[in-house]
């Protein structure tokens, strides 16, 4: 029955990965921006949740919404001040957002201090099926990840913003000719991706210690998901998260955690060897 | 072209003179610090070969640096008997597989071979499949993260999170060197490596590699195999990084997982970006300026350091896309180029003079 527990844990980790990688995938896949500050946006989301739920004693879910709003605003600001001037220069966006990442970390450190903060778990009970124990909060994260996937799919495929967003991603010049305000769409897209990072931070806050450098671990994992799944593909993000989450847990069962991570890394490299664009390629016309 | 050579030469001689005279007017502590920067110059040149000249942004170069450094550091530690961190895990004898490290020359060789080998293997896997620049950057980033985790995890053999402390200072051939002697050794090494890299990037090989950066498909069309060139230069870069790591250990006195991970790797990229990539002098300038400034700042305002470096990165990327030295060079080049262009236009005009005259007379 240990296996059952491990698989269940793997699914919940996959849920976290989906939430973390969604925003990154949108920004990376559509805008061709490597956002090194993604981890720090997650961190800002977690701090926002901390302020709302622990300091102001509001319900956790209010913190979650606030996290989306705050990080979306921060994201819009980053896009307007920095990223806007760098489109088409992918590696430069990487460097610039690394600079932004250092700035964000230091600003948060100056406001909240270097120490870790904790956020109370809003759903402390857990569900047991046989000997498999699933804490309700982890179950919530899984459901929430699915909900977010559907929400993002809805936004991209059904709303007016989504149509413009896809148009811009496919042919920027043509969209401009058709009267779409591409720079506005860019700002919205970056803000949306950043907001998703903020929500990820809110969801992670009760599970981990909230600290200025917490984002880095998730950054690498999220990039691995995006690379494995295929850039710009929602299905790829979901499957990639599932594979990495499960592989991590199952391998940890037979080896150590670090060795498990290394094996997952090798797995990703092997997949990339044969499918350089990831498991699911985005449709391009 | 003449001016460009002059700038590099003049600045190079100026920096070399500064480095050579530095111990005469600075305290031992400052000399150690400057020695560390000289090591970073070697490391930055190693990255410049792959990023600046070949266009492969490696975000995990500290792995090679750390691998070299750890080999030498472990060798020093083991020579003093079974270290504390091993006995804590119940290892009371030096493990079989670590006994070769007891000899400094063997450790030195391993510190050169292992990083080169790792670079070759990774290069083989990544460049043989046509993984594009961005994916390569991300994969190397993950590699750095993993290597740091691994060093932490293998606490019984690497000292884990604490790193390896209390290493003997500068014992190159048995007896310890003075700070200044070791410092001058570093400066000479840096100069030799600079000249080697300069020669390499100006050779035929260097030209092929630069054309890979500019247009990989075209060079493939000319029946070159870009993958082999990339693997080769990545291996050289791994070798030089391992060497830098080993030179770093004696002057720093300790090595820790932080020297092998994402933080160190990205800092290296930042130095190069700020100095100017694709120009070896840019690597030198970037390392010296950023390290000097951030050291001054972190001594006076420990908090401001990250704000400063973050701001500098953003500003340089936005306003000086070629880095500090690169922009300087580009500006000088442009002047000479425009002068040359006007000269050649004049020449052409003179050649066509008759034609123009004829046309005019037609009207």
Image (spheres, helix red, strand yellow):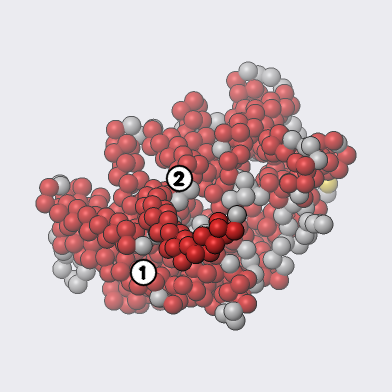
Nearest the camera: A179 or A285?
A: A179
Which residue is at 72% across, 23% downward?
A62
Looking at the image, which residue sits at the far left? Answer: B24
| As drawn, B206 above or below A117 | below
Question: Which residue in the structure is indicated by mark 1?
Answer: B197
Query: What mark, if any, has residue B320 been given in the picture?
Result: 2
Looking at the image, which residue sits at the far bottom? Answer: B223
Q: Quadrant of residue A57?
A: top right
Q: Secondary structure at mark 1?
A: helix
On the image, the x and y values in percent for residue A77 come to: 60, 31
Nearest the camera: B293 or B14?
A: B14
Q: Give the class, few, some or many, for how many residues have Cα within 10 Å of label 2's Cα (few <14, many ≥20).
A: some
Left or right for B202, reference A278: left
Q: Give the class, few, some or many, for how many residues have Cα within 10 Å of label 1's Cα (few <14, many ≥20).
A: some
Q: Nearer the viewer, mark 2 or mark 1?
A: 2
**Residue B291 appears anywhere in the view:** yes
Left or right for B29, reference B151: left
Left or right for B84, reference B278: left
């Amino acid at each position: 029955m240990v296996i059952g527990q491990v698989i269940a844990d793997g699914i919940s980790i996959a849920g976290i990965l989906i939430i973390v990688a969604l925003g990154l995938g949108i920004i990376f896949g559509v805008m061709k921006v490597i956002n090194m500050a993604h981890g720090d946006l997650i961190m800002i989301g977690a701090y926002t949740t901390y302020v709302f739920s622990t300091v102001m004693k509001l319900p956790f879910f209010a913190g979650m919404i606030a996290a989306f709003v705050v990080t979306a605003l921060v994201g819009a600001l980053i896009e307007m001040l920095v990223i806007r001037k760098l489109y088409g220069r992918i590696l430069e966006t990487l460097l610039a957002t690394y600079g932004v990442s250092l700035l964000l970390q230091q600003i948060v450190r100056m406001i909240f201090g270097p120490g870790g903060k904790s956020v109370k778990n809003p759903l402390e009970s857990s569900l047991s099926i046989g000997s498999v124990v699933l804490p309700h909060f982890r179950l919530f994260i899984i459901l929430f990840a699915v909900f977010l996937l559907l929400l993002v799919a809805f936004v991209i495929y059904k709303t007016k913003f989504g149509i413009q967003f896809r148009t811009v991603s496919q042919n920027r010049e043509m969209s401009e000719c058709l009267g779409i305000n591409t720079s506005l769409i860019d700002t919205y897209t970056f803000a949306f991706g950043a907001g998703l990072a903020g929500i990820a931070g809110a969801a992670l806050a009760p599970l981990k210690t909230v600290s200025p450098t917490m984002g880095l671990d998730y950054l690498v994992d999220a990039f691995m998901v995006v690379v494995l799944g295929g850039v710009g593909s929602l299905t790829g993000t979901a499957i990639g998260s599932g594979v990495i989450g499960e592989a991590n847990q199952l391998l940890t069962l037979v080896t150590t955690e670090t060795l498990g991570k290394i094996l997952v890394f090798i797995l990703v490299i092997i997949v990339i060897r044969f499918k350089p664009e990831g498991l699911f390629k985005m449709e391009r016309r | 072209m003449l001016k460009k050579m002059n700038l590099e030469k003049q600045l190079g001689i100026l920096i070399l003179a500064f480095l050579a005279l530095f111990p005469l007017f600075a305290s031992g502590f400052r000399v150690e610090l400057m020695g560390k920067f000289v090591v970073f110059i070697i490391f930055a040149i190693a990255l410049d070969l792959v990023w600046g000249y070949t266009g492969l942004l490696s975000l995990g170069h500290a792995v090679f640096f750390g691998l070299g450094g750890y080999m030498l550091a472990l060798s020093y530690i083991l020579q003093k008997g079974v270290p504390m961190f091993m006995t804590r895990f119940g290892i009371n004898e030096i493990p079989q597989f670590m006994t070769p490290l007891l000899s400094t020359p063997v450790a030195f060789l391993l510190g050169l071979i292992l990083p080169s080998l790792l670079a070759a293997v990774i290069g083989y896997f990544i460049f043989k499949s046509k993984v594009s620049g961005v994916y390569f950057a991300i994969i190397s980033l993950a590699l750095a993260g993993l290597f740091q985790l691994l060093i932490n995890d293998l606490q019984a053999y690497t000292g884990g999170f604490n790193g390896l402390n209390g290493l003997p200072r500068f014992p190159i051939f048995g007896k310890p060197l003075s700070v200044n002697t070791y410092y001058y050794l570093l400066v000479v090494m840096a100069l030799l490596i600079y000249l080697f890299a300069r020669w390499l990037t100006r050779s035929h090989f260097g030209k092929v590699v630069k054309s890979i950066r500019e247009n990989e498909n075209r060079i493939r069309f000319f029946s070159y195999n870009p993958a082999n060139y990339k693997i080769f230069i990545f291996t050289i870069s791994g070798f030089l990084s391992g060497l830098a790591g080993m030179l770093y250990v004696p002057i720093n006195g300790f090595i820790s997982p932080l020297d092998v991970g994402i933080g160190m790797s990205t800092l290296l990229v930042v130095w190069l970006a700020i100095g100017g990539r694709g120009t070896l002098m840019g690597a030198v300038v970037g390392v010296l300026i950023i390290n000097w400034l951030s050291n001054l700042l972190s001594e006076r305002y420990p908090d401001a350091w990250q704000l400063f470096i973050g701001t500098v990165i953003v500003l340089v990327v936005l306003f000086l896309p070629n880095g500090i030295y690169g922009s300087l060079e580009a500006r000088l080049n442009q002047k000479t180029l425009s002068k040359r262009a006007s000269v050649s236009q004049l020449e052409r005009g003179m050649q066509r003079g008759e034609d123009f005259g004829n046309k005019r007379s037609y009207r």
